């Protein structure tokens, strides 16, 4: 184990001297943060409403006839915070909303009154106090995406570069053990992910989002980085060393769908029905829910989601550490 830290420091110094690496670690997340935060604010011209309870399907269809509300069946009051939406319980006749959507409540009540034209059905509006905003949603989504891109691209990029430049051969001739090499790479990924996240959160602060930083957030960030780094190590380990560049291509094929078919930038409700379940429960989305719970809500994350991420981390790291070796057996 004594070789892990010196090797990790050497990898960090070696790669952070590169302008290309610094650009990827800092500039890429900044671009994502700016673009999707602005898009998130623009999309608020259409207000999401989730309806659950009696006649929820009919009510959602009725609200969708408006030019303002986009209604979905299902959800719960937590969606007010998670998705900056309005939640209507048509059974208890309660409307849950945040300060962000408070101006639309009178109009929503009017639509609901028109739906219940011949019934006395007064709705009670209940404001949910939350710091969630479109910017908070997008920034926290970018943080989740950073763990994906740094984890996969970091391992495959650094590893393939070291194989290409024959630095791995020099490492293999040293006393360093295979698992120490893998651990050093993991430490490097955690470091650059923290750097990228700091840059992203600075952008969020400039745009009005003050995150709730703490140990639960840091733990989720590190765990997510290790999960995707382990997957990157498995990909690199499976790639024939004479064609090691293919690992980056495989990483690209994984990163793009996992990034955009997720809840990172948009609610899973906007996806076609055959993609909704995947968009809501794939690893990036689970990690985003953990990040949002800690960063935006200041709460402990869903233990089920955290457990799934932990299991995937152990599995990916176990497979990656066995496949990614300095020395061919």
Image (cartoon, rainbow, N blue to C red):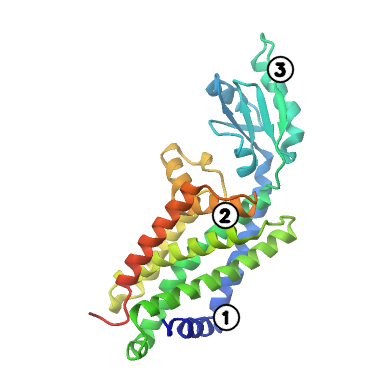
Decide: is 33 above or below 118.
below
Q: Which quarter of the picture shows residue 312?
A: bottom left
Residue at image location 57% in from the left, 80% down from the top: 19
Q: Is residue 241 above or below residue 254?
A: below
The residue that label 3 is drawn on is: 122
Q: Disc 1 vs disc 3: which is toward the camera?
A: 3
x%, y% of residue 169? 33, 88
Labels 3 & 2 near each other (Cβ < 8 A): no
Depth check, mark 2 against mark 1: the one in front is: 2
Residue farthest along the left direction in this orientation: 329
Residue lying farthest to the front in this orientation = 1
Sequence order check: which comes first, mark 2 or mark 1? Answer: 1
The residue at 53%/31% (across/down) is 74
Instruction: Name the quarter where the C terminus is drawn.
Output: bottom left
Establish if 94 lies above or below 98: above
Locate residue 231 relative to residue 116 in the image: left or right.
left
Image quarter of the N terminus: bottom left
Horizontally, residue 38 falls left or right of residue 172, namely right
Which residue does the numbered mark 1 point to in the structure image? Answer: 19
Q: Residues within 10 Å of mark 1 (few under 14, many from 20)?
A: few
Q: CA distance from mark 3 to mark 2?
A: 37 Å
Q: Secondary structure at mark 2?
A: helix
Residue 325 % position (x, y):
31, 77
- The residues bearing labels 1 and 3 have C-alpha atoms spaced at a distance of 61 Å
Rendered image: mark on residue 291? 2
At mark 3, the secondary structure is loop
Q: Is residue 52 visible?
A: yes
Q: Residue at 67% x, 28% y: name it.
A: 95
């Amino acid at each position: 184990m004594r070789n892990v830290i010196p090797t990790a420091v050497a990898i960090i110094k070696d790669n952070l001297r590169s302008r290309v690496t610094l650009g990827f670690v800092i500039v890429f997340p900044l671009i994502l943060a700016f673009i999707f935060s602005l898009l998130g604010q623009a999309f608020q011209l259409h207000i999401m409403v989730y309806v659950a309870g009696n006649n929820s399907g009919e009510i959602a269809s009725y609200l969708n006839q408006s030019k303002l509300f986009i209604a979905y069946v299902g959800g719960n009051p937590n969606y007010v915070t998670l998705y900056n939406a309005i939640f209507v319980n048509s059974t208890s006749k309660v409307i849950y909303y945040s300060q962000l959507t408070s101006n639309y409540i009178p109009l929503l009540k009017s639509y609901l009154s028109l739906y219940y034209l011949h019934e006395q059905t007064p709705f009670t509006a209940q404001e949910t106090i939350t710091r969630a905003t479109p910017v908070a949603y997008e920034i926290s989504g970018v943080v989740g995406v950073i763990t994906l891109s740094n984890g996969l691209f970091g391992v495959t990029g650094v590893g393939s570069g070291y194989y290409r430049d024959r630095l791995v051969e020099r490492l293999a001739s040293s006393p360093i053990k295979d698992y120490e090499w893998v651990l050093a790479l993991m430490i490097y990924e955690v470091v650059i992910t923290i750097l990228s996240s700091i840059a992203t959160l600075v952008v969020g602060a400039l745009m009005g989002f003050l995150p709730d930083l703490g140990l639960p957030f840091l733990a989720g960030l590190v765990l997510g980085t290790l999960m995707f780094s382990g997957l990157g190590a498995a990909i690199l380990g499976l790639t024939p060393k004479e064609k090691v560049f293919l690992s980056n291509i495989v990483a690209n094929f994984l990163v793009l769908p996992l990034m955009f078919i997720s809840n990172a930038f948009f609610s899973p409700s906007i996806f076609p029905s055959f993609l909704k379940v995947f968009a809501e429960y794939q690893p990036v989305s689970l990690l985003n829910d953990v990040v949002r719970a800690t960063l935006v809500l200041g709460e402990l994350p869903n233990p089920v989601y955290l457990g799934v991420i932990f299991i995937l981390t152990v599995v990916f790291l176990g497979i990656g550490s066995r496949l990614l070796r300095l020395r061919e057996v």
